[in-house]
Every structure is written in structure tokens, then in C-alpha cells.
Image: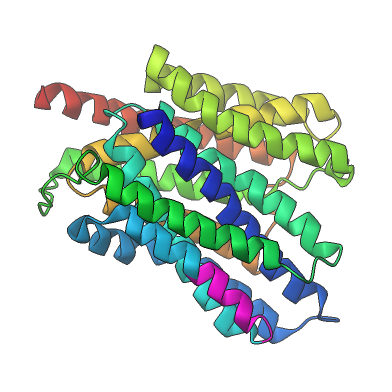
Amino acid sequence: MKKSIVAIYSIIHFVVDLSCAVLITNMISHKTGQDLNVFIAIIIYNFFAFAVQLPVGIIADKANKNAICSAIGCLLVAVAYGFANYEILACLIAGLGNSLFHVGGGIDVLNISDKKATLSGIFVSTGAMGIFLGQKSGSIGAEKNYLLIVLLIISALLLIQLYLKVRDRVNNEEVIIPTINKKMLIAIMCLIVTVVIRSYVGLILAFEWKSSFILALISIFVVVLGKMLGGVIGDRIGFIKTSLFSLISSAVLFLFAFNNSILGVIAILLFNMTMPITLTALSNLLSNNKGMAFGLLTLALFIGAIPVFFGYTKMIFTPLGLFGITIVSAFILYGGIRIYNELEMEED
């Protein structure tokens, strides 16, 4: 049953992010020049899709109807297509729908993960491919998106059916206001800062060799693969070893990634391996508040993207800059995971 739950959520994750990307890319392609409304709409979309996951997650923890939450999210994304001519409203609705889907799915997957990172790595990985393909399909004029709307409605129905079948198996633990001591606060902040850095760096990696569609597609594929492998390897050899190996190795490879696409692709793969580790560690620290944990890290993703929205993409986009920021991230994450391990041992 666990495999079925993760498979359903992972496939629908692809559909939801694909649908949102197509919607936004179509709106941009219809505009000429710099349109302020589109810029504002994109900011609003990202705010509701990522930052709003924190309050949605807190509410979802208490509601304990996770698959229903995700189903409503799918339907909202479908509804957003009906307002495609009103950029700001469409992005608000789609962003909120995206948020609801991710929170519901994230909680359900974390609930069945037994404190391991493998399943969450699979769930979070598929969205990147959806976004990439959605941006490409939107930019070539995919204006009639009835198929996506149908897929979203089918997804919602599948999630409702899932809720009726497994609600007793994936219920949340009793929601308790977490008691956060100094050590836990430091660990939480380290995990959040790591995700802020990963978000920013991931968005600025505009290597020239990515202008090739094939290499760009391979780059997205290794993002997906990296997130999956990060969870699997993290469970096998430990979160600290996986984090240090992946981040330090990617930092070294970033030194050569500008001129060598093969090393660049490997660097991107390694850089993304910590995604399920940070999510799993934080959700385990806040085990009675998994929606809150999920929302804190998506808020971190939004914070990391803010400089990119305003054009600050070249500050560290150099070989030494990427090397330095990745090494800093490795040490911060090491500190957070080390404290996390200590807290887990104390709990046992």
C-alpha cells in the first residue's frame, strides 16, 4: 500500500506542476515586452505556491484530511485555467491549489515513511520534470489545455478515492504544539538556511551549455534522480555522510561545470541529493506537525527565490562563488544533521 500511495502522489505531483507551468508560461508568451502585471502575477503565484504552504500545513495538521486537501488543490489548479486572461487572479488560484496539493501529499507520504527519506525523495522529485516540460510546452503555444484540466479532475477523483481507502492508515499523529529547546531551534534553523541556499543556487544555474534542449532535459532528469538517490543513500549510509559527500563533491565539480557539461550535470545531481534529507530531518524533529515542517521548508524555497525575482542572479554565479556557497551549505547542514542525530538519540 505504501508504494501505491507514493506512486499516486508522485504522478499527480508531476501533473500539478506541469499544469501550473503551462498556465504561467502561456500567460508570459502572450505578452510583449516587460509587463508589470505578469511580473506581479508570478510573484503572487510563487508566494501562494510556496510561502503559503506554512499556514496551510498548520491547518492541514489539525484537519487530518490530507488526500482531500490535495484533491482540492488539483481542482483549484484546474479552475485557474478559467481565469487565464486575468493574470494575478489565475496565479493566486493556481498557487493556492499547488500549495494545498503539496501539503496534503507531503504529510501523507511523511506519515508512512517511518522516519526514512526514501519515500519523500521519490515524492518531491517528480515536480521538477513537470515544471520543465510545462515551460517548454507553454512556450511553443500550447493554448488549449483541456487535457490538463481533465487530468487534474481525474487526479482529484483518485485522491478522494485514496482518502476513503487509506484514511485510517495514514492519519496524522495527535497535533501538539512543539516544545522547541535551544538545540532543536539551532537544528531547525540550519535545515532552513540550507534550503534557502539550495533554492537560490538551483535557480541561478544558467550554464551556457543548457541552451541545448537535450542537455537541459538531462539536467532536469538528474535533478529528479538526485532527489531520489539522496533519500535512498541517506537511509543506507546516514544523513551526515550523504550530505557531506554530495555537497562537497558538487562544490568541487562546480569549479569545472561552466566549461564541461558532463561535470556540470554530475554536480547538479549531487547538489540535489540533500532535498529529502532536509525534509525528513525537519519532519522528524516536528513529528506531530509534519505539515508545519513541510511548510517551513517551502517558505525557505520562496525566500531563496526572492533575489532571483529581482534579477540578482550573477552575484555568486562563478566557479569560485558556487564552490564557496556550496561548501558553506555543507557545513551548515552538517551542523543541523549532527544536532538532529543527537536529539534522535536522546529521544530513544
Q: Residue 30: x and y, percent?
A: 81, 79
Marks counted in the figure total 0
Can residue 218 be spotted in the picture?
Answer: yes
Please name the colour scheme applied to the rendered image.
rainbow
Nearest to the observer: residue 187 or residue 156: 156
Rendered position, 82 above or below 333: below
Q: Residue 68: x and y, percent?
A: 34, 59
Q: Residue at x 49, y 71 (%)?
A: 76
Q: Is residue 275 left or right of residue 177?
A: right
Q: Is residue 311 magenta?
A: no
Q: Residue 292: x and y, percent?
A: 28, 54
- Which residue, as the protein is rendered here, is positioned at the far top? 237
Q: Which residues are magenta?
A: 76-85
Q: Looking at the rendering, which quadrant does residue 339 occupy?
A: top left
Q: Residue at x 10, y 52 (%)?
A: 176
Q: Is residue 55 left or right of residue 31?
A: left
Q: Residue 37: x and y, percent?
A: 67, 85
Q: Looking at the rendering, which quadrant does residue 72 occupy?
A: bottom left
Rendered position, 136 above or below 193: below
Q: Residue at x 42, y 34 (%)?
A: 4
- Which residue, as the protein is rendered here, is positioned at the far right? 212
Quarter of the picture containing the C terminus is top left
Can residue 314 be spotted in the picture?
Answer: no
Quarter of the picture containing the N terminus is top left
Rendered position, 174 above or below 50: above
Nearest to the observer: residue 124 or residue 260: 124
Q: Is residue 83 magenta?
A: yes
Q: Is residue 324 left or right of residue 339?
A: right
- Magenta span: predominant SS is helix
Q: Is residue 121 left or right of residue 14?
A: left
